[in-house]
Image: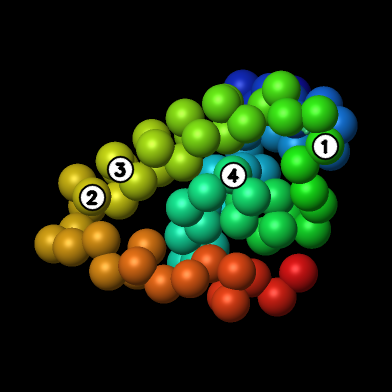
Amino acid sequence: MRGASMIVCSCNVLTDSEIRAALNRGACPRTPFAVYNCLGCSLNCGRCIVTVRTIINEANAGTATGGSSREPCETDAIVLCPV
Ligand code: FES
């Protein structure tokens, strides 16, 4: 059993765990498009975009509580994601 991962994007077969991992890589993608880019895929049908945005918001809220600033997320994720 792999925990509580669920498929968020069925077009690209992305799980919430993969999306959270991309958000924790230090690149801090702030938009769904940046997340897809980091994971080497792109938006297709768009059904998942609200869920991806929610996961981003949750991750940003968690980051904000753990540090004194949000500086790491001020960086352009597309530059930092080599995929
Ligand atoms: S479900 Fe994510 S692009 Fe279609």
Whole-angstrom CA distance, mark 4 to mark 1, is 12 Å
In the rendered image, residue 69, in percent from the top left (x then y), is placed at 18, 63
Q: Which residue is mark 4?
A: 32
In the rendered image, residue 54, in percent from the top left (x then y), is placed at 47, 30
| Mark 2 or 4: the one toward you | 4
Q: Which residue is mark 2?
A: 64
Q: Which residue is mark 1?
A: 44
In the rendered image, residue 20, in percent from the top left (x then y), is placed at 55, 44
Q: Quadrant of ligand 1?
A: top right
Between discs 2 and 1, the one toward the N terminus: 1
Between discs 4 and 1, the one toward the N terminus: 4
The residue at the far left in this view is 68
| Mark 1 or 3: the one toward you | 1
* For residue 82, side relative to residue 79 (left or right): right
Between discs 2 and 4, the one toward the N terminus: 4
| Rendered view: 69 above or below 36 | below
